[in-house]
Image (cartoon, coloured by chain):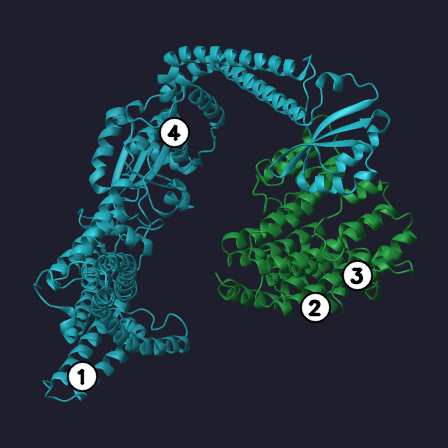
């Protein structure tokens, strides 16, 4: 199949769906609202989120519910693009669901570990979307082990086997790390079956994201966690685009934060670290904006490729994150002129 | 050759009989069940208020739904365990079916032996697991051979820990690239698909540090057996002895199973059949209404089956059951009767193409005969070839015989036969027109005749459609559409006038001039525009259902569409002639190619490939084009397809009645 047949229709669909993204004015209005109910009302009346909010009584909505509904909209949009693909491409795009499912499963695992009831997550949007498991088992879990057993039959399971083998104790950190690492393995396996040109595009796009995540991980590891350099290194993602293994190794074995700063500054990702003490607060936002602009420019250069679908899903994610940030800002009474600094969209 | 007449059946019986009655209905398998509550809400029970029925009528005042939901999962588990163990196929056997309460009896019997059977099955599972574990040991021990380490020495290490681990290749690579910082000696023992087996030797004092590193590589420990001793070969021998030990025990257990199976396998098969019956009966009961001592079941039964149901019920329950079969009258409210098409075997396979579009409504004429005949006619005319038709026919027979898709096979068989008839008329065998003479016409030599006959065929078919439409409107007493509508009498007259007008103009036989037919057509169009107010005048109802403004906008567009569609519908049929020509044309192309080749053998190859190509591709196109003519040009005239399929409760097929009633 040539690229025109493969991408012409889906990219047109994506173009129209991009038109549904919130406008800058919407962001401004949302930031000016006073309560969660008002945000829900605004989204229902004025935006494409009416699709998932239409039947919901926005007067009595609470934060968790709104989050799940907004994510539901993301699910619908992704499902719509999946329809346009066939074969290996379909299976690749479906894999992009795994990232969000893993995020949710990690949260549930943490909650279960802390003795909370997994049933509270019953309305999660992504659980089961990729793994195709019986989600009830997840929501009935009492231990992390139960979640792992629930994932039996999914592609995640084989990565999780070492966690239930032998006499390991319940450990949310290990669960989280294994799940994260499994995503990149699965993703790589899936994209290796695509056309050469698309693999190249993905290696760049996902590689840049991996670079950023690696720097963030090592930075946090050195500053906050008590992990040995060996462990830090083993938990890095090995599909980086600009940072090779030796550079990552140098970062992990950096003797001090200063040395770490010095090495990062020598790469293209120096912008992530600032000496003015804002690094911890804004690192994530800086990464996301960087991803946003990198993807935008890649989309321009590779009009007929998988990048449109790939980037579209990430943009959806950013918008969802932004709405959640706005709601949180409102909830915790962060003033408007502060709140906009925490969102991905540049206003 | 029509839609089967249905009767609405009410079955009222004693509450104590509800299990048996529902089993009987399921076994009988001809009742399309309705939800009793919605039925009682929308229609009155047709019961004379005699002394005999007094009690029943009183019960109607306080009915409640059937709630007790029986859980069969436990029984199902037991039966499945037995079936797995005895190697029985899950099949429903009619000779096991019965109305009485045998199910419980059999289950009590099975439950009694269940414990010992479970014991055996668990024993087998445990031993199989043991064998598996020992096999793993065997594998793991063999890895040691690869790295030339002696087992007895490894075990006697005092200051070092030895472990056998499995890592993914990716993680193994990470380990290798950072080996200078790892406090262990690492040997690569084996590489399996995607994974690497390593052996590590770590000083006991550094074990904790090493463990953290391995954890971050997500290792899987490969266990080494502890309870065996000696050299590597000794251990392997010991394990093998143990494996054959376990295997012998499994065999022994299997023998005891064979004994049990002799006694119980019949009971288990019977239990399986009865469980299926019980489940279906339970589903049926969900749709019933219960009084304090009676229950009510409602459903549709085809007229021909009603007596059967009545006799069976009377046989089992005598006078304790009230069975009423009413005619379905027009004033019925609530659920429409389901449709069961009944056609002679020549037409029956085509029912599947009809239901693909939609089931006929109960009151509607069954379009199958007309559809089947016209479909065969058009397919044959477009794809007329004695040889290729034979292939299609054989393919149809094969599909019908070998696969479950009986109706598709049937359709192909009939289309193939039709194609063969037309092949004889055209004198065409595998594309060649030289082998036999034409009985009727050579398409390529008479292009105009072909195209004109196609149009004539179209006109005939459309006329029949109009007649169907008129009959349907008549039976549903729809004055507005029937008399004045586009597919009604007015539309039909418009169509006829147009045909005669054009025919007269072309042949010059129209002596009164073109003005008269044009005038008639304008009048007819005006009638169509005013169809709603005209109906209102005629029947004395309101003139407009909605606002007149909206109505006329819609009617105005309706007129434009009528004019366009009448013309395009007729012209559409030209494709029947065109494809007949196309069929010959394609063959000519291949024949020319074959002639251009020097070698005769290669030429024949080309012809064979050409024929395969024509059967595959053209056959498909013609199949679709005929379907398109049927669905679009003809069905739009007379067929609504809003019916509900007749789905009786029964043990075979889906029998999922009730669900769609909600």
Q: Which chain is displayed in cyan in the rendered image?
A: B
Q: Quadrant of residue B210?
A: top right
Q: Quadrant of residue A334?
A: bottom right
B92 vs A130: above or below:
above
| Residue of label 1 | B517
Q: Nearer the viewer, mark 3 or mark 1?
A: 3
Q: Nearer the viewer, mark 3 or mark 2?
A: 3
Q: Quadrant of residue B492?
A: bottom left
| Left or right, residue B295 beside residue B28 | right
Where is residue B414 drawn, in percent x and y? 19, 52
| Residue of label 4 | B276
Is disc 2 surrounded by few (<14), some (14 to 19) or many (20+) residues within 10 Å? some
Residue for point 39% across, 78% down? B553
Which numbered disc covers residue A26? 2
**Do the residues at pointers 4 and 1 share their chain?**
yes
**Do the residues at pointers 3 and 1 share their chain?**
no
Q: Nearer the viewer, residue A99 or B460?
A: A99
């Amino acid at each position: 199949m040539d690229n025109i047949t493969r991408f012409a229709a889906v990219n047109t669909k994506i173009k129209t769906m991009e038109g549904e993204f919130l406008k800058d004015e919407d962001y401004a209005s949302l930031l000016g609202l006073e309560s969660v109910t008002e945000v829900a009302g605004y989204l229902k009346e004025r935006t494409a989120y009416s699709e998932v909010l239409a039947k919901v009584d926005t007067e009595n909505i609470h934060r968790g519910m709104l989050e799940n509904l907004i994510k539901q909209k993301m699910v619908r949009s992704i499902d719509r693009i999946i329809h346009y693909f066939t074969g290996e491409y379909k299976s690749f795009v479906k894999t992009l669901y795994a990232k969000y499912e893993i995020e949710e499963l990690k949260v549930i695992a943490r909650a279960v570990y802390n003795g909370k009831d997994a049933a509270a997550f019953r309305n999660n949007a992504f659980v089961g979307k990729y793994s195709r498991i019986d989600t009830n088992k997840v929501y009935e879990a009492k231990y992390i082990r139960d979640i792992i057993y629930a994932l039996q039959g999914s592609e995640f399971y084989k990565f999780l086997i070492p966690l239930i083998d032998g006499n390991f104790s319940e450990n949310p950190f290990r669960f989280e790390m294994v799940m994260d690492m499994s995503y990149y393995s699965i993703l790589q396996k899936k994209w290796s079956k695509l056309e050469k040109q698309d693999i190249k595009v993905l290696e760049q796009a996902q590689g840049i994201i991996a670079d950023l995540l690696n720097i963030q991980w090592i930075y946090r590891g050195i500053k906050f966690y008590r992990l040995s350099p060996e462990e830090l290194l083993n938990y890095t993602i090995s599909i980086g685009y600009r940072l090779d293994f030796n550079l990552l190794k140098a970062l992990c074995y950096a003797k001090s934060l200063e040395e770490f700063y010095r090495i990062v500054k020598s790469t293209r990702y120096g912008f992530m670290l600032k000496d003015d003490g804002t690094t911890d607060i804004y690192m994530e936002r800086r990464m996301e904006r960087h991803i946003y602009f990198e993807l935008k420019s890649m989309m321009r250069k590779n009009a007929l490729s998988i990048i449109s679908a790939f980037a579209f899903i990430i943009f959806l994610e950013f918008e969802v994150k932004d709405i959640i940030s706005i709601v949180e800002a409102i909830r915790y009474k962060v003033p408007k002129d502060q709140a906009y600094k925490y969102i991905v969209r540049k206003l | 050759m029509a839609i089967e007449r249905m009767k609405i059946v009410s079955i009222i019986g004693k509450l104590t009989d509800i299990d048996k009655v529902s089993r009987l209905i399921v076994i009988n398998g001809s009742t399309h069940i309705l939800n009793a509550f919605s039925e009682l809400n929308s229609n009155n029970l047709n019961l004379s208020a005699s002394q005999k029925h007094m009690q029943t009528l009183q019960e109607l005042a306080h009915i409640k739904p059937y709630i007790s939901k029986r859980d069969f999962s436990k029984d199902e588990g037991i039966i499945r365990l037995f079936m797995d163990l005895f190697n029985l196929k899950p099949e429903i056997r009619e000779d096991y079916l019965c109305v009485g309460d045998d199910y419980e009896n059999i289950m009590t019997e099975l439950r009694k032996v269940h414990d010992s059977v479970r014991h055996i099955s668990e024993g087998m599972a445990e031993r199989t697991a043991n064998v598996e574990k020992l096999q793993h040991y065997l594998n793991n021990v063999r890895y040691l051979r690869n790295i030339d380490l002696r087992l007895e020495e490894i075990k006697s290490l005092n200051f070092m820990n030895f472990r056998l681990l499995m890592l993914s290749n990716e993680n193994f690579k990470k380990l290798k690239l950072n080996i200078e910082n790892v406090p262990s000696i690492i040997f690569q023992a084996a590489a399996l698909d995607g994974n690497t087996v390593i052996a590590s030797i770590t000083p006991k004092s550094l074990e904790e540090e090493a463990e953290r590193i391995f954890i971050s590589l997500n290792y899987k420990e490969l266990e080494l057996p502890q309870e065996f001793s000696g050299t590597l070969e000794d251990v392997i021998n010991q394990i093998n002895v143990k494996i054959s030990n376990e295997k012998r025990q499994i065999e022994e257990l299997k023998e005891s199973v064979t004994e049990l199976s002799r006694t119980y396998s019949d009971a288990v098969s019977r239990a399986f059949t009865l469980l299926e019956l019980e489940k279906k009966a339970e589903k049926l009961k969900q749709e019933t209404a219960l009084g304090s001592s009676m229950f009510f079941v409602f459903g549709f039964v085809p007229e021909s089956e009603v007596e059967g149901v009545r006799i069976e019920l009377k046989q089992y329950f005598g006078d304790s059951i009230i069975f009423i079969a009413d005619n379905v009258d027009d004033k019925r409210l609530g659920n429409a009767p389901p449709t069961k098409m009944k056609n002679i075997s020549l037409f029956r396979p085509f029912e599947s193409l009809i239901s693909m579009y939609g089931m006929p409504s109960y009151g509607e004429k069954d379009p199958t005969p007309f559809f089947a005949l016209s479909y065969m006619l058009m397919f044959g005319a477009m794809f007329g070839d004695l040889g290729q038709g034979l292939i299609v026919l054989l393919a149809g027979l094969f599909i019908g015989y070998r696969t479950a898709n009986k109706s598709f096979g049937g359709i192909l068989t009939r289309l193939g036969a039709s194609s063969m008839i037309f092949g004889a008329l055209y004198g065409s065998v595998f594309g060649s027109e030289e082998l036999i003479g034409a009985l009727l016409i050579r398409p390529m030599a008479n292009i105009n005749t072909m195209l004109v006959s196609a149009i004539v065929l179209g006109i005939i078919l459309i006329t029949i459609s109009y007649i169907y439409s008129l009959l349907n409107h008549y039976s549903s007493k729809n004055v507005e559409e029937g008399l004045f509508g586009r597919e009604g009498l007015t539309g039909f007259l418009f169509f006829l006038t147009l045909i005669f007008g054009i025919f007269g103009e072309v042949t010059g036989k129209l002596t009164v001039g073109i003005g008269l037919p044009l005038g008639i057509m304008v009048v007819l169009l005006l009638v169509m525009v005013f169809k709603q107010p005209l109906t209102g005048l005629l029947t004395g109802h309101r003139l407009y259902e909605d606002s007149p403004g909206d109505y006329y906008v819609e009617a105005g567009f309706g007129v434009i569409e009528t004019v366009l569609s009448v013309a395009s519908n007729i012209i559409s049929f030209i494709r029947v002639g065109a494809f007949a020509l196309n069929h010959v044309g394609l063959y000519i192309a291949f024949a020319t190619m074959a002639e251009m080749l020097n070698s005769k053998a290669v030429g024949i190859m080309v012809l064979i490939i050409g024929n395969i190509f024509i059967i595959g591709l053209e056959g498909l196109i013609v199949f679709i084009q005929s379907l398109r003519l049927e669905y679009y040009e003809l069905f739009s005239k007379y067929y609504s397809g809003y019916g509900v399929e007749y789905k009786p409760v029964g043990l075979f097929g889906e029998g999922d009645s009730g669900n769609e009633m909600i």
